[in-house]
Image (cartoon, grey):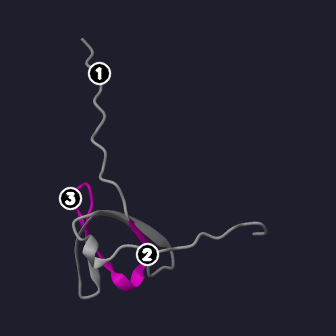
Amino acid sequence: MPGRIGARLVVSVTPADVGERVSLRRRLPTGEYSDVVGVLESWSGGRLQVRRRNGETVDVPESTVVAGKVVPPTPPPKRRPRQD
């Protein structure tokens, strides 16, 4: 597209970030991209384990990660005012 500025993909997550909440963009075998957000549980043997908010663990091959960064913790749920 003329005039479109491409985004620069950067992986700033390292094995030192285990325990932190991260956002990863990975390339799927279909060529599409998928995002994984959660706590980086481990990074070993070329594989990252990310635990999502719902408790699901996602195994992400390091070779498929095209962008990633540490992100702030999930904000607490908003409290709804009581209706009496």
Q: Nearer the viewer, residue 56 or 63?
A: 63
Between marks 2 and 1, how big is the CA–CA gap? 41 Å
Residue 39 vs residue 27: left or right? left
Mark 1 / mark 3, whichever is N-terminal = 3
Q: Is residue 52 above or below residue 18?
A: above
The quadrant in which the N terminus is found is: bottom right
Query: Mark 3 Cα within 10 Å, few/some/many (few <14, many 20+)?
Result: few
Quadrant containing the C terminus in the rendered view: top left
* 1 on left or right of 60: right
What secondary structure is found at the residue carrying circle 1? loop
Which residue has dot 2 on it?
11
Question: Is residue 44 rendered magenta in the image?
Answer: no
Please, what is the three-letter code of the amino acid marked with disc 2? Val
Q: Where in the figure is residue 26, as x and y percent of width and height?
A: 42, 74
Query: How far is mark 3 from mark 2, CA to CA?
Result: 24 Å
**Badge number at residue 55:** 3
Coordinates of residue 62 in the picture (x, y in percent) = 35, 82
CB atoms of marks 3 and 2 within 8 Å: no
Secondary element at tag 2: loop
Q: Residue at x 30, y 53 (%)?
A: 73
Label 1 crowding class (10 Å Cα cut-off): few <14, some 14-19, many 20+?
few
Task: Please say whether residue 65 is one of the residues in the magenta stretch.
Answer: yes
**In the rendering, which numbered label is found on residue 40?**
none
Determine the main secondary structure of the stretch shown in magenta. Answer: strand
Image quarter of residue 54: bottom left
What is the magenta range? 50-69
* Three-letter code, disc 1: Pro
